[in-house]
Each structure stands twice: as C-alpha cells, then as structure tokens.
Image: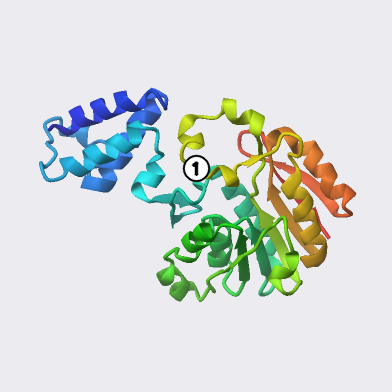
Amino acid sequence: MLLKDFLKEGAARLESFYPAREAMNIMLILCEERIGTKRFTHLVEPDFSINDGDLPRLKADLERLSCGEPIQYVLGYADFCEFRFTVTPDVLIPRPETELLCKEAIRVLGTVPKPRVLDLCTGSGCIAWTIALNIPGSVVFGTDISQEALEVAAGQEFSSELEETGALAPVFIKADLLGDEKALGQAGFDLIVSNPPYIKESEKALMSPNVLDFEPSSALFVPDDDPLLFYRHIARWSRILLSPGGRGMVEINELLGEETKSLFAEAGFEEVIIVKDFYGKNRFVSFGK
C-alpha cells in the first residue's frame, strides 16, 4: 500500500473527530513513529510503499484512532517541556498550557537552594518530573489518590537524565487531597503546585469525545454545585505545609479565575494573582504565604 494512500484514507476517517489538518498531522505522527517516515516523505516520494509487514500494526493503530482514542494513548507517550512522558488511560495527557505553570515554577525556585516541592494530583508526574529534572538538588514529592496513576508517574524512565544532571527522582505517595494532609508527614515546602480536577459536569457538552471517552473522568470533573472543591483543600494543605515565604501555583478553570483568586485571598494568602496563558485565557493562580 502506498504511504500517500494510507495517509489519505486515515485522515479521512479521523475527520469526524478532528479538523482536516489535525487529522492529517496525527497520521503523519503515527507513520513517523511506527515506520520512520518523515512529514514530507509522501510528497517527495509519492511512490513510497509501506512494507507488508508493517501494515497490520498500522491498521490496528488506525482502528483505535478512528474510534476517537488519542494518538498519545495509541503511541504510549506524550511530549511535555522537552521531555517524553509515558501515558496510559490511567492518567491525563499533559497539555502544552500546563508547561507555563512548570516554567513559572522553575523561575520562582531558581534562587532557592535545594527547594522542597509538592505536586498535588500528580497524575503522570509530568509537573513533578519537569521541576525535578530542571532543578538538580530539589526534593520533589507527588501525590495522587489513584494507585494506577502513581505507578505511571513512578515508572517514568529518566535514568539517563538523572545521571547526567545529578537530579533526584521525585517521590510519589498515595494521598487523598480531600482527606488528611498528614500523609506527607512534614511541612516546610517552598512550592506547592497542582493541576486538580476543575471542569464542571455541565461543561461536558462542550468537550470532544476523544477526551470524554478515553481520559480519566476523576481527574477532570467536579460537581457544578461545588466547582472549587479541590482548591479549598489545596488552600488547607498549603496553610499547613508551605514554609513562610513559600508559594503555591494551581491550574484553574478559565471561567472561574476571579472566584479561585478570591478563595486563596480569603484563605489568608498574599500576592494572589491570575496568570494568563498564550491564548490570553486565565490559566493558573499563584499565591504566597
């Protein structure tokens, strides 16, 4: 089968979930990963033929994609902050918008010697690992209520990066954010970060099936009548676990920016600000103790 024909057929099948350009881009990513072709191979080599031995796997992958399964789950990884993270349906797929939180965290910690960092609702561990690998000497903890998510986070393969930089691998602990903060054992964190569930149940109608049907709903949604549920508990944990002068950073629902800011201000935190992303949307709230 010619590569150009496979790409065309696959992109057409994916257009029920994605715009045409994105559908084709997904097919190009798939072929680049599975058979080593480049984004331009089908253009410069229109007669390029896919080996018969590669077709069964490609077609099986296409079946998964055409059911709406995200390409990251099909390939088993997602790129984030210049690192490649293992992802499974037990964890959310890291988003580019969350990279902004990591970059700001790294900037804030730049002058703190051997900082202690806590990542609540760690999921894949992408935030915890990114901070740890960028700040050698930092001591990073990640918590999650999901044992499956913790196994994914702890199993991220960065041994060569750890050896090269001398960084310490994050420590991942099972803990319920809505429960007892004593699971961490001790206070004294210089930074607390979190990307908690914040999408209201009523917003499901606005979301695409490839998110709703495949990513873990427990990491996405909150009740309409209590959309700031997790932020109240983050504030509670932060009051107890943050060192004086420490900071917190939480990703937020863009529609609830002012409400989230007010929650942390009313909880007694200082310098509470909303930070916008590269689309001009409210992306996270930063606060100090």
Badge 1 local density, few (<14 within 10 Å), some, or many (20+)?
many
- Pick the quarter of the image with the N terminus: top left
Q: Nearer the viewer, residue 110 or 5?
A: 5
Res 25 quadrant in image: top left
Query: Is 265 rendered above or below residue 55?
Result: below
Judge left or right: residue 213 versus residue 203: left
Q: Pinpoint residue 113: horizontal percent, then vertical percent.
A: 68, 74
Q: Pinpoint residue 88: horizontal percent, then vertical percent.
A: 43, 51
The residue positioned 73% from the left and 39% from the top of the image is 227
Judge left or right: residue 119 versus residue 56: right
Query: Is 287 rendered above or below residue 169?
Result: above
The residue positioned 77% from the left and 60% from the top of the image is 237
Residue type, label 1: Glu
- Pick the quarter of the image with the C terminus: bottom right
Q: Secondary structure at mark 1?
A: loop
Judge left or right: residue 150 versus residue 264: left
Q: Is residue 130 visible?
A: yes
Query: Is 239 rendered above or below residue 93?
Result: below
Q: How many marks?
A: 1
> What color scheme is it?
rainbow
Q: Nearer the viewer, residue 152 or 4?
A: 152
The residue positioned 61% from the left and 38% from the top of the image is 278
Q: Pinpoint residue 135: horizontal percent, then vertical percent.
A: 59, 68
The residue positioned 58% from the left and 26% from the top of the image is 206
Judge left or right: residue 37 versus residue 254: left
Q: Nearer the viewer, residue 102 or 117?
A: 117
User: Label 1 belongs to which residue?
Assistant: 215
Res 66 quadrant in image: top left
Query: Is 45 rendered above or below residue 179?
Result: above
Q: Is residue 242 visible?
A: no
